[in-house]
Amino acid sequence: MTDRNDTYVSPLEGRYASREMRELFSAQRKFSTWRRLWLALAESQKALGLDISDAQVRQLREHLDEIDFAVASEYEKKLRHDVMAHIHAYGDAAPEARAIIHLGATSQYVGCNTDLITMREGLEILRGRLVNVIDAMAAFAEKHRELPCLGFTHYQPAQMVTVGKRATLWCADFIRDLRDLEYRLEGLEFRGAKGTTGTQASFLALFDGDHERVKALDRMVAERMGFGKLAAVTGQTYSRKVDAAIAAVLAGIGASVHKLCNDIRLLANLKEMEEPFETSQVGSSAMAYKRNPMRCERATALSRFLMDVSMSPLHTFAEQWFERTLDDSANKRLAISECFLAADAVLLIALNVASGLVVYPAVIAAHIAAELPFMASENILMAAVRAGGDRQDLHERIRRHSLAAAEQVKQHGRANDLIDRLQGDEAFAGLDFQKLLDPAAFVGRAPQQVDEFIESEVGPIRKQYAGLLGQKSELSV
């Protein structure tokens, strides 16, 4: 929790997102990355023959993280330009290197490249979260692979599934999110040293028209910042479609969390399953008995925000004119950071919930018992036919008994007595009703599907990301 109580603080910062993600989008990380980019540029330019001394490079390296924000703020008030303000502040800290800081670069050399570096690291954090959610959900599915429960279509009782099989549906969506994230992470391109409008004209002038050294500078800076891929062409900025595509992946994560948590909220109402509930947790300030699904409610709320804000980068991309307009800047500062912080927050909740889900088999069994007689009627019909009965006569008898039993349930609130009625009908005498009403006979291949899913889909992820497994999610509120 934040100690800043006299000014507005985004709830994503103060309540929901992890310290790791908050630090990633901090001013300290942003502007120290700017300095690392200026250092990479100077080192590369020196290696390619520009007149830059060892002492200048050394001074730049010595002051990467010692940022005087007060000085930078004063410069920005005067200059009305954040990049120039930090160039001057860096120059004050490294006076010998002042003349070569930002040499040949445009503001978006630090702006765009820092954003790409930040998003890359943010995706890596979220990848770890996703892997652990997948692992926890798969463990839950495996534990309950055989536990029959009612399936629901249209939120009406349908053919039975198992608790574990249902969990694989949630898990499979997170795996799709992981694959989308991996695709964007693997394909992320560095903007590099492209100059004011992307033509590299300023660098071409610095290197006296030597195109090969200009191209080498671009590659060297990218490599120094850990990027193997470099954008072939840019305007003043990298294409904002990159932001839109990444935001779409984060929105997909939000949608998966929303689906999971909505399902759990519905199951909590049925008292079949609940999110973790701590010993001292209060469900309601008025109704002391309540166990509200507050984690899942929070997750769906934040997921809606994430899905909504993720559209903003798409509008920003569409709005860019020619090589670049500045109306992307203020929007981008808000939308990208909030997308990452919100995605981080909802995955932390999803991991917390998936790691502590509580199942109530007795309630599930009671719900099955209320519906199974209707579901089993076709099996009972076939067994009676095989025992020598007339199919049409048997069908009519089951129809009449079913209507009568349904009336008892719907009109009088009584238990479903269809089986008692059928057992009392001489046409169904001799049938093994206990065997015909075994819930395990109605779940199809659900247990085997759980096993196959974990082996084919989850197993490789666990193996690939073994080093990321084991994260815990302790929520701050």
Image (cartoon, grey):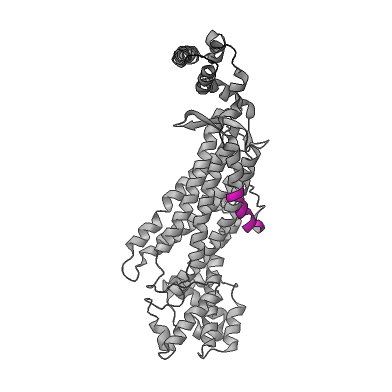
x then y, percent, for residue 207: 44, 89
Q: Residue at x 58, y 61 (%)?
A: 23
What is the total number of numbered labels drawn onto the structure image? 0
Is 1 located above or below residue 96 in the figure?
above
Is 91 located above or below residue 161 in the figure?
below
Q: Quadrant of residue 206?
A: bottom left
Is 254 located above or below residue 150 in the figure?
below
Is residue 6 visible in this depiction of the protein? no
Is 52 located above or below residue 465 in the figure?
below
In the rendered image, the residue lying farthest to the left is 321
x then y, percent, for residue 294: 56, 38
Does the magenta portion include 166?
no
Q: Residue at x 67, y 52 (%)?
A: 470
x then y, percent, for residue 26: 54, 62
Q: Which residues are magenta?
A: 455-466
Give the position of the C terminus as an image quadrant: top right
Does the magenta portion include 463?
yes
Closest to the observer, 365 or 475: 365
x then y, percent, for residue 86: 50, 74
Is residue 424 visible in this depiction of the protein? yes
What kind of secondary structure does the magenta stretch mostly adopt?
A: helix
Q: Quadrant of residue 234?
A: bottom left
Closest to the observer, 208 or 23: 208
Q: Quadrant of residue 269?
A: top right
55 to the left or right of 395 = right
